[in-house]
Amino acid sequence: MKYQPVDLSHVTTYPIGTRKNKTIMARDRSGSVRAGMSVADLLAAMPPQLGAEMLVGVIDAVVSARANGKPVVVGMGAHVIKCGLQPVLKSLIEADVITAFALNGAGSIHDYEISLIGETSEDVGAVLHCGTFGMAEETGRDINLALKRGVAQGMGYGESVGRFILENGNPHREDSLLAVCAERNIPVTVHVAVGTDIIHQHPSADGAVIGEATFTDFRLFTSIVSELGDGGVYLNIGSAVLLPEVFLKALSIAQNLGHHVDHFTTANFDMQQHYRPLQNVVKRPTSGKSRGYTITGHHEIMIPLLAAGILDKINS
């Protein structure tokens, strides 16, 4: 045969004590875990590396931002609402942690349905082929009406729906993020692509109204983003395409208008890391003197942990 097994007897080695290692137990090991720990103690017990280090970094950035009067803005996909995390988000609102939200259209729809009947998220596969998917009368009728009324008063998409929930006296409005924010005058912008949401299927849909409402919110969101510099925080939670694109464009306008947003923190929370959030939230916007983090995990686990860590640190 042309090849023979190599002879390992001539391989050279070196003492392990001369090797440079990435993991040093005295520095990188976790603490012990015990029953009855506080969240702050649990976070402190996590090994100070990789995902744990990033999560603590985000918590520190959020706490620092609010201590210095800087905004903490949360952009969210609809899955966060469907997971029932509004009470967690409400606790952060009540603690004056989150100063603004951005949602996609689906997030606002799920939030509205919860405010109305305390339930949401139909089984798409079971009804798609019979032509009833997305055709619930109240959802399309009410949201499209809310937008028409709100636009006539100069409001954007998020405020229009939030105030409609309150004025309509929806039975489960205490579970609505839009309603809570409307009560407290916290900006919630909603960013839609026409044709992506079920309310666009309804006879009551008006493209001009939908476009004006979401464009107003885009301009409002840009104003919010312009204040992120010098210590603000932007968190993208579960939006893989739409909100990362909106954030990048808003940041570009803010820079163009002379705000020069820098020295801020971004983070992407998702069950897996996608291209656009990584590029448009974590990497490109922070390429100057800012910092971007990636936190991978299920929203129903990571967001309560994040919130508890923030609240524990604020109150410590």
Image: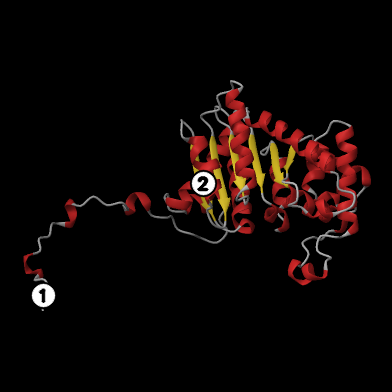
Foreground residue, 48 or 230?
230
Instruction: Judge from the rendering whether residue 246 lies leftward or rightward of residue 262; answer left or right.
Output: right
**Going from the N terminus, do you reach mark 2 or mark 1 first?**
1
Instruction: Judge from the rendering whether residue 82 lies leftward or rightward of residue 28; answer left or right.
Output: right
Residue 100: quadrant of the picture: top right
Q: What element carries label 1?
A: loop
Q: Residue at x 78, y 70 (%)?
A: 129
Counting other residues with Cα less than 10 Å from the Cα at mark 2, is it few (<14), some (14-19), or many (20 or more)?
some
Q: Which residue is drawn at 20% across and 52% down?
A: 19
Q: Which residue is drawn at 52% across and 50% down?
A: 275
Calculate the distance from the C-alpha at mark 2 to the C-alpha at mark 1: 48 Å
Pinpoint residue 145: horizontal percent, then vertical percent.
90, 45
Residue sitting at the far right: 168
Report if residue 316 is visible in the image: no
Per the image, the residue denoted by label 2 is 278
Counting other residues with Cα less than 10 Å from the Cα at mark 1, is it few (<14), some (14-19), or many (20 or more)?
few
